[in-house]
Amino acid sequence: MAWRGHLSRNLKELRICFCQTSPASSSARAFIERNYKDLKTLNPKFPILIRECNGIEPQLWARYDMGVERGIRLEGLTEVQISKAVEELVKVGATLKA
């Protein structure tokens, strides 16, 4: 879980987009409810943007240096799989800096 403290080192911004009510976004909502506080505590100045919009497909976006962005569709993923997806995005950020 060391990657949780490296968000601000490897990323510029993390955006999570989901619907407030749809079943497709339930895992994304659960991920936010259970992990946001911990992620923000470990990265207090890092922007974690939560965007809610009725009827949209749940997505996760990471912005790196030089405006590079990577996105992942979250529909059908479990909360654990979403956590792994964030971890992979952090690892990608480490490789982009090298």
Image: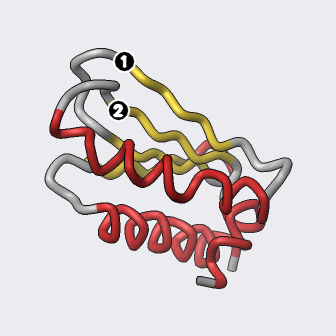
Left or right: residue 27 compared with residue 38:
left
- Label 1 sits on residue: 53
Choose between 12 and 34: the one closer to the eye.
34
Q: Position of residue 26 (x, y in %)?
A: 26, 43
Q: Position of residue 74 (x, y in %)?
A: 27, 50
The N terminus: image quadrant:
bottom right
Type of amino acid at the residue the image marks with label 1: Cys
Residue at the spot 60% in from the left edge and 68% down from the top edge: 93
Mark sitting on residue 75: none
Dot 2 falls on a residue whose secondary structure is: strand
Residue at the spot 59% in from the left edge and 78% down from the top edge: 95
Choose between 42 and 63: the one closer to the eye.
42
Residue at the spot 65% in from the left edge and 46% down from the top edge: 13
- Label 2 sits on residue: 18
Q: Quadrant of residue 7?
A: bottom right
Sequence order check, earlier mark of 2 and 1: 2
Mark 1 surroundings: few (<14), some (14-19) or many (≥20) residues within 10 A: few
The C terminus: image quadrant:
bottom right
Left or right: residue 31 compared with residue 49:
left
> Which residue is outermost to the right?
45
Type of amino acid at the residue the image marks with label 2: Phe
**Is residue 28 depicted above or below 7 in this figure?**
above
Check whether the beta carbons of the residues at disc 2 and disc 1 lie within 8 A of each other. Answer: yes
Q: Position of residue 23 (x, y in %)?
A: 16, 37
Dot 1 falls on a residue whose secondary structure is: loop
How many numbered marks are there? 2
Measured Cα–Cα span from mark 2 to mark 1 = 6 Å
Q: Quadrant of residue 47?
A: top right
**Is residue 90 depicted above or below 55 in this figure?**
below
**Is residue 94 depicted above or below 62 in this figure?**
below
